[in-house]
Amino acid sequence: MCAQTYGYFDIGEHAWMLLDRIRVDAFRQAIEAVVRPGDVVADIGTGTGILAAMAARAGARKVYAVDRAPILDVARAFFEENGLLDTIELIREDARRVDFPEPPNVVVSEMVGNFGIEEDMLGLFNTVAARCTPDVTFIPSRLDLHFVPLFEPGLHEELDRLSGLTDGLTMRSLVSRIVNRPVHHRIAREEILGHNAGPLPIRLVGADTTIEEIRSTMVLDRPGKVNAIGTFYHLELAPGISLTTGPDGPPTHWTNIKFPVYPPLELPAGATIALTLFPKFLPGAGVWSWEVEAGGEVRAGDSMATLLGSPLDFLGVLRLKRATPALKPNPVHLERLAASLGGHVTDLPDMAASMYEKLPSEFADERDAHRQLLTLLDLLNALE
């Protein structure tokens, strides 16, 4: 029923998440621990409405279920079926624009991806926080990113088979491309060769909304061949209540992301590995480049190089044609829009600053506004 889904406009995707009992039960426990009778709760990206319903059942006086997608029709039927429409108010709108009738003192949201923060959680949470009470509580409130060195046998086997296909034929040229493709697969305990010196803690509210670079240091606990760096996270929902995508936790609908290290690094126990990861959260897509250094050797990968064609072709698939987006020489739609609004087309940083100045309540900061501007201009087909 839910083996293959097609994104959040597919009802199967939502059913797949509801069937994840680890996820659902952890959020239920957190909501029951935080929400008190009389609270006003906002559920951002409510989807089918399960978290909003849990907040209502926990005693909230009012719950605002916010989503900009048509899945809200499913949520409405769910609330009506369970007699919750007197408590829950549905709002079909981008959460950045919502002017809540009453400021929430609790915000719950499950806009969490396989990497944790790629669903614009930082910018969104910090924007919404400005419309809440000063003592607002967010569920979740913190995310700790972990990185571990791996020997991934499946990756090793596949690359080995591709390198030498059959009858003396090789395809090392394909291997040189595909090793830039992050692997989405759960980390097994036996794959792990070491530990990271310390996780990267990310506060989801009250912190920087843009992460341009991530650094992590790992140490090998046993000798081995490192052919990937694995990632997982611990998500703090409420004091004493958390979710993990780590190998010691039960499996969930989330997967782990593994960044290939190729050629593999043969390292002794006690060796130190330095990772630098560059998240590239372009409009509508999250891609990465990474660099791994150990024993004086460096390995690098860049998911921009995985699809067929040049980097420009890949950016075209992402609906952008340059790694640093710029305005087209003649952005017709943008010029018409600017003319209709009595303005003019300027450089991107100036446009972002102006947008933030005129709509400060819709963005966490100016960098957040710049990111959203790229999405808007992309929709207008004004970027190259």
Image (spheres, rainbow, N blue to C red):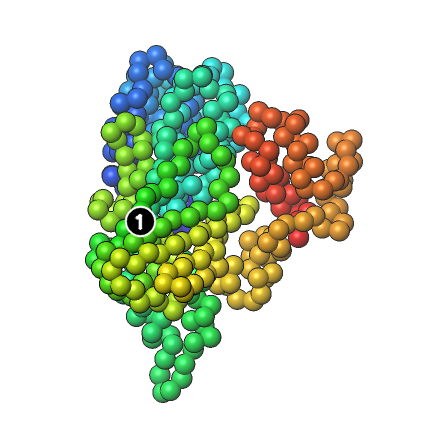
Find residue 152 and report its horizontal and vertical position in percent.
29, 62
x%, y% of residue 19?
Answer: 27, 41
- Residue 360 sits above or below residue 2 on the image: above
Tell me: 249 left or right of 15: left
Residue at position x 47%, y 75% in the image: 173
SS category of the residue bearing label 1: strand
| Outermost top residue | 38
| Viewer-nearest residue: 208 or 344 | 208
In the rendered image, is residue 338 in sight?
yes
| Position of 353 relative to 253 (above/below) | above
Would residue 349 be found to the left or right of residue 208 on screen? right
Residue 70 position (above or below residue 3): above
> Picture coordinates of residue 373 (x, y %)?
62, 39
Question: In this figure, which residue is indicated by the disc labeled 1?
Answer: 196
Can see residue 82?
A: no
The structure residue drawn at horizontal position 69% and vertical position 37%, both measured from the top left corner, is 351
Name the one closer to the observer, 270 or 199.
270
Q: How many marks?
A: 1
Which three-letter amino acid code belongs to the residue tagged 1? Asn
- Across and down, in percent, residue 192 comes to 25, 56
| Residue displayed at 33% across by 74% down | 160
* Rendering quarter of residue 342: top right
Quarter holding residue 184: bottom left
Q: Callout 1 environment at 10 Å: few (<14), some (14 to 19), or many (20+)?
A: some
Q: Residue at x 31, y 20 (%)?
A: 35
Among the 4 quarters of the image, the one containing residue 367: top right
Whether residue 201 is situated above or below residue 173 in the rendered picture? above
